[in-house]
Image (cartoon, grey):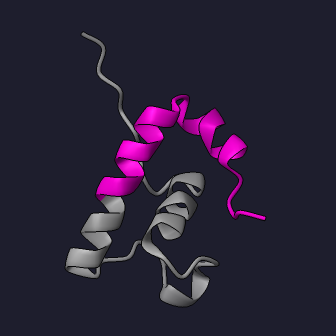
Amino acid sequence: MIYPSIDKILQIVGSKYILIQVAAERSKQMNETGHLQMKENEYVSKRGIGRTLEEIEKGLIKINVEKE
């Protein structure tokens, strides 16, 4: 089973497309800078995408959608 649940995260984000974009950008940022928002041993996931989803679920990443 995937942790955290995508269904749970979509209730926070609201759009699969925005979720994919944010997760990809944050994962790339983690790989380039090594900056983590939680202690490394607090993450369940070992990979950047999973860690990004955990950060979104815990409210550490705020997603603002601008309407045109």
Q: State the image quarter where residue 58 is shown.
A: bottom right
Could you tell me residue 9's position as x and y percent?
Answer: 62, 45
- Is residue 4 shown left or right of residue 50? right
Q: Is residue 15 magenta?
A: yes
User: x, y percentage for residue 46?
Assistant: 54, 82
**Above or below — where is 43 with respect to 55?**
below
> Whole-percent x and y of residue 66?
29, 21
Image point 57% across, 63% down: which residue? 54
Q: Is residue 4 magenta?
A: yes
Q: Is residue 26 left or right of residue 60?
A: left
Q: In this rendering, is residue 68 above or below 37?
A: above
Residue at the outermost bottom position:
41
The residue stretch that appears in magenta: 1-25
- The quarter of the displayed image where residue 14 is located: top right
Q: Is residue 67 above or below residue 35?
A: above
Which SS type dominates the magenta stretch?
helix
Quarter that holds the C terminus: top left
How many numbered marks does the figure carry? Answer: 0
Residue farthest to the left?
32
Q: Is residue 35 left or right of residue 8?
A: left
Q: Residue at x 71, y 63 (%)?
A: 2
Please tell me which residue lies in front, 7 or 62.
7
Locate the N terminus and report the quarter of the image it occupies: bottom right
Taking 36 as reference, is 35 left or right?
left
